[in-house]
Amino acid sequence: MQNKIILGDCLEVMKKMPAESIALIYLDPPFFSNRNYEIIWGDAGEIRSFEDRWSGGIDQYINWLYDRVKEMHRLLKPTGSIYLHCDWHADAYIRVMILDKEFGYENFRGHIIWKRTNAHNDAKKKLAVLTDTIWYYSKSNNFSFNPIYSELTEKYSCNFYKYDDMDGKGKYSLGDLTNTRPGGYNYEYKGYLPNANGWRCPFETMQKWDADNKIYFPKSQHQRLRIKRYLSETKGQLIGNDWIDIQNVQGTSIEKIGYPTQKPLALLERIIKASSNEGDVVLDPFMGGGTTMLMANNLQRNFIGIDQSIAALDVTDKRLQANGIFTNYEIEKHYFAEEDLRAMDPFEFETWIVGKFGGTPNEKQRGDHGSDGMKDDVPIQVKSWKNKIGRVEIQKFFSVCHAGRKFKEKQENGLPVGYFIAFDFAKEAVQEMARLKNEDGILIERVLVSEIVDVAKRPVVRIDCSKTLDGKYEFRAVSDSVIINYSWDFNYPIPAHKFPQEVGKFNPSVLYDKNGVRVHNFAEGGVHNVAVRVVDDKYLENMAVYSFGE
């Protein structure tokens, strides 16, 4: 499955996805906190969602979330799992009214408590809430799970691995060889007997461990045999549901993006490792800044991320690129830049737009006899390279349509004999199609690209620069468009003589900026190139470069 980040309401997007196609879902939906800081990005999609889920209090919030979790249950494979991240405001409601109801009480797997912060001033007045809840459910009893280990602390290692035979194998601890429940293996081994439950391993295994010097023999045969667990062989300490060892993203953290609900990479690393395997598909329906996508890629999983905030998609896209991930994911959005579509390889554009139109594109570029695809048993022609289609192109396409096997049938029933797709049609082309229809009842339907997909112009942007009183530089990105996000690169690699052509790799140090104003300090001397990329309210982007110095 192709990795994707998708702009849209996750409910509508998930309805179009195939059932039982996802191995793991992690969701960090907006909390039921009734505070304005829930508006993170501030663009229209997020604000609309905020209003929808709050219009009727807790009941409305639960209904809003339940509709989406129900769709997630459909998408999960039988072996799949879901981790739902929430806080104290609604965690009990979410478990009883959503997860138990949809996944079943019997498929509850864990109540993970993540220590998100340390005690603060609230603790002087009441018990401060320092933790979030992550509910963990599986779709069935046959679920994928990989045991979770944490690194051993020095204190733990010293306390529990305190024996050493001085044979070069290092320190070890002693573990029980008797079974914890009735039904173990009952036999005598070198004069030692088990307890009433029996040994935990068969005789052959005991012999192998003995040969490997992994059995500890006490001096008295009235004492129990023990197994040696070497520190060098341990995977770490098994972890339960109290996750107090993962720190929230701090102000000085290198992974900090700049929005308040960002979750740490280590948290997603633990979840993804526990409940998925390499090659599996991980879904995050409230993607935010793309932490799940980045970690899934790092762990060789495939990913699908959904968010209805344009800023969230832009930050995720830039974050993936900043981590060296460029080509192995697709962005699904609503609007397309006309400049990009016209610049596409003609055959690639034909294939893409015919598919969007609901037709069947040609598999081969050559030998198409003037047709670029078919719909309703009639030919489709596509032109992306001409500004306006003229009379000559219509006349040529008429010959293609006339040769079609359904031409007569379509003509007699007043149906289109062909579809012509282009960015624009000249007046004489429209007149020629009208003449064919009026005189001969031949309907060639003209279709604008903008009628198939939403097309718009890129935003225009420039950078203004001024010096502050303390000698720093203030950069202001100026645009007439509604800009959702600004990202900045203060060391853009572009030779001064090629300005303003874009020739370098954009490597932003600022991924998320709502205001478009940045103050920066530069070393004296040399040429400095500052670049800004802007994304507008149609998720179209453009870039400007400001160059100064000698």
Image (cartoon, rainbow, N blue to C red):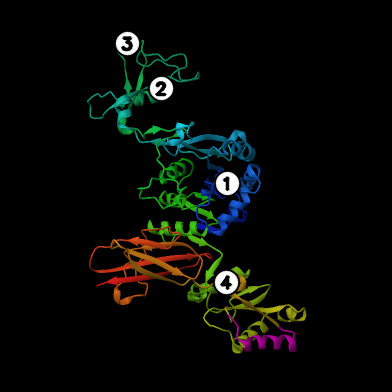
Q: Which mark is residue 203?
A: 2
| Secondary-structure class at tag 1 | strand
Residues packed near mark 4 inside 10 Å, few (<14), some (14 to 19) or many (20 plus): many
Residue sitting nearer the eye, 99 or 120: 120
Q: Residue 250, labelled with which disc?
A: none
Q: Position of residue 41 (x, y in %)?
A: 50, 55
Image: magenta residue range: 424-442
- Where 351 falls versus 241 (above or below)? below
Using the image, tell me which numbered label, if any, was put on residue 76: 1
User: Residue 414: image x %, image y %?
Assistant: 76, 79
Residue shown at the point (52%, 34%) measured from the top left = 111
Marks 4 and 1 close (CB-CB < 8 Å) = no
Label 1, label 3: how many angstroms apart (C-alpha)? 55 Å
Image: 273 above or below 396: above
Residue lying at 40% horizontally and 45% vertically, measured from the top left: 249
Between 282 and 331, the residue placed more toward the observer is: 331
Amino acid beneath label 4: Ile
Near-viewer residue (267 or 519): 519
Mark before the other along the chain sequence, 3 or 4: 3
Question: Magenta includes 433?
Answer: yes
Name the residue carrying label 4. Answer: 353
> SS class of the residue under badge 4?
helix
Evaluate whether residue 17 shows in this view.
Answer: no
Identify the element where label 3 is drawn: loop
In this view, the mark in front (2 or 3): 3
Dot 2 or dot 4, earlier in sequence: 2
